[in-house]
Image: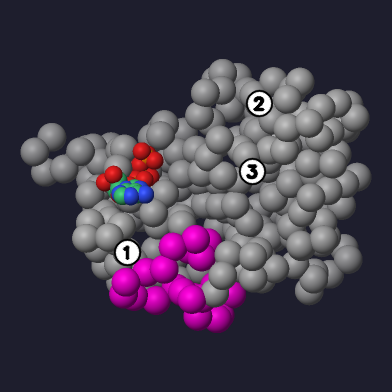
Amino acid sequence: MTAILEVRRLCAAYGDFQALFNVDFEIAAGEIVALIGSNGAGKSTLLKAITGLMSPTAGTISFAGEATSRTPAHALVRKGLAMVPEGRRLFKGMTVEDNLRVCLDRARADVEPASRWTLSRLYDLLPVLKERRRELVERLSGGQQQMVAIGRALLAQPRLLLCDEISLGLAPKVVKEIYQKLPEIRASGTSIVIVEQDVSRARSSSDRLYCMLEGRVTLSGPSGEIAQEDISRAYFGAHS
Ligand code: ATP
């Protein structure tokens, strides 16, 4: 297994408050990995450390074979690490297409032309974005805005796409539609991490799963092989 991301014994803190304790987390090339855990478990903190938005207090992070725990976020994007942030963070007052174009000049450069995401390839994956490309982004539904956020991240030509709670606030039908696109994104050579509150969706959409609780990884393994009772214990703690 070639790891695209390797996190070893990672610790991180907000001032005196330690939020991550010796976290090990690994993604192989071409994998879809789900990260679950209740509120405050440390999922967003782990993503912040991976994307260079927060410096770890101990441990190592290696992305595409290079140590990155001190690499700034913008440099990591150029190395192929893209994030679909919680809340989408689109640019209001700009059209769909202009929101998508934002990433084009910050994209990873060393991509074969045949594997490169272009606007037209993106519009094939998400046709609704083509239909609405000239509209202001705030006029789109929540699900369509989420697709813009995903599209924008793909145009950065990621090796690894980190999706932070992409289903938050969306109708189940729309969530299903978005999740159905993940295998096609993975087939383009991009590994994917999904942070997801819905445990059964996380399980059914991923190859492997990590569960966190109080800043620690409490369970990891192949999504199809982990027993539901083990997930409940890892999610809620030994007293559940
Ligand atoms: P959620 O699902 O609610 O987003 P999470 O698993 O992403 O939860 P984190 O946001 O990583 O959890 O939070 C981990 C711990 O760190 C929590 O106890 C939280 O209160 C704390 N924390 C998060 N951000 C900060 C901050 N900016 N300052 C201080 N403590 C923080």
Image point (46%, 44%), residue name: 195
Q: Report which residue position mark 1 lands on.
A: 12
> Is residue 232 shown above or below 72?
above
Q: Earlier in the sequence, mark 3 or mark 1?
A: 1
Residue 104 magenta-highlighted: no
**SS at mark 2 in the image:** helix
Q: Which mark is residue 22?
A: none
Q: Can residue 14 be seen?
A: yes
Q: CA distance from mark 3 to mark 1?
A: 30 Å
Counting other residues with Cα less than 10 Å from the Cα at mark 2, is it few (<14), some (14-19), or many (20 or more)?
A: many
User: Is 1 situated left or right of 130 in this image?
Assistant: left
Counting other residues with Cα less than 10 Å from the Cα at mark 3, is it few (<14), some (14-19), or many (20 or more)?
A: some
Tag 2: residue type?
Gly
User: Residue 221 is drawn in which quadrant?
Assistant: bottom left
Tag 1: residue type?
Ala
Q: Report which residue position mark 2 lands on.
A: 143
**SS at mark 3 in the image:** helix
Cβ atoms under marks 2 and 3 closer than 8 Å: no
Q: Report which residue position mark 3 lands on.
A: 182
Tag 3: residue type?
Leu
Residue 50 magenta-highlighted: yes
Q: Which residues are magenta?
A: 49-70
User: Residue 104 is drawn in which quadrant?
Assistant: bottom right
> Is residue 8 shown above or below 231?
below
Q: Earlier in the sequence, mark 2 or mark 3?
A: 2
